[in-house]
Image (spheres, grey):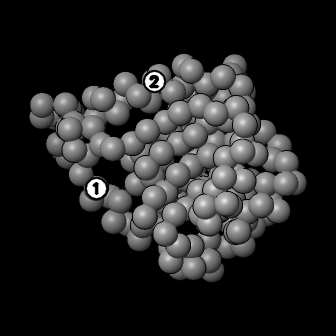
Amino acid sequence: MVVRVLRLGHRSERDRRITTHVCLVARAFGADEVVVSGENAGEAVSSVEKIVLKWGGDFSVKFDKNWRKILLGAKKKKHLIVHLTMYGERVQDVVSAVRASKDVLVVVGAEKVPREVYELADYNVSVTSQPHSEVAALAVFLHEFFEGKELEKKFEGAKLKLIPSSRGKKFSE
């Protein structure tokens, strides 16, 4: 199974930190890749690539301006498209059906999401019907999707590993 995330509508000045956080959450919570679309996201992509090198794991992040091509390509390959939105079906009502799919593309927006995304999505999914962050929505969705098993994920090739501690920072290299 492959889980990819499409960060839709990145705006360079406004969304740099949030896009980076979307990528970090996607990686930490079990996704395989993030594709950032919109304005050039070179700084965010570079930042995440450095984190992957240091903290390990098989995760990639890339930029592709054309979100429509990504969605249509996923449709053509019969990947399930899940759009995270506060206007969708409740995650707890659809996550089992989503989990049954082989390949999943999770879409999280930055700016106003075009109607076409809602129509192309197999599922428009809400983690809450209240205003919230796309970063939080992605974390909750992936946690539900992987049934909490992502919390035990090992990141191969890590140069740095955090050792759980009740006080202070402990690392092994």
Check disc 1 and report the residue beneath it. 153
Disc 1 element: loop
Looking at the picture, how far across and down is residue 144, in whole percent? 49, 68
> What residue type is disc 1 on?
Lys
Hey, which quadrant is residue 152 in on the image?
bottom left
User: x, y percentage for residue 139?
Assistant: 51, 54
Check if mark 1's residue and mark 2's residue have beta carbons within 8 Å: no
Please state, as top left, top right, bottom left or bottom right, where the C terminus lies in the image. top left
Residue occupying the far left of the picture: 172
Task: Look at 43% across and 38% down and name the residue there.
Answer: 60
- Which residue occupies the extreme right position in the image? 115
Please determine whether, in this image, residue 152 is positioned above or below residue 7: below
Task: Give the residue type at disc 2.
Answer: Ser
Read off the residue under disc 2. 47
Residue 13 locus on image (x, y percent): 69, 19
Density class for disc 2 (Cα within 10 Å; few <14, some 14-19, many ≥20) is some
Marked residue nearer the N-terminal end (1 or 2): 2
> Hey, which residue is sitting farthest front in the picture?
76
Residue 169 picture quarter: top left
Residue at image coords 41%, 71%: 147
Q: Residue at x 63, y 42 (%)?
A: 7
Quadrant showing the N terminus: bottom left
- Residue 29 position (above or below residue 24): below
Is residue 43 among what the camera can see?
yes
Residues at marks 1 and 2, CA–CA distance in whole angstroms: 22 Å
Is residue 110 visible to the viewer in this orientation of the structure? no
Badge 1 density bin: few <14, some 14–19, many ≥20, Cα 10 Å: few
Number of numbered discs visible in the structure rendering: 2
Residue at 45% across, 58% down: 2
- Please say if 15 is above or below 134: above
In the image shown, does 35 or 90 lie closer to the viewer? 35
Please state if 74 lies on the left or on the right of 170 as rendered.
right
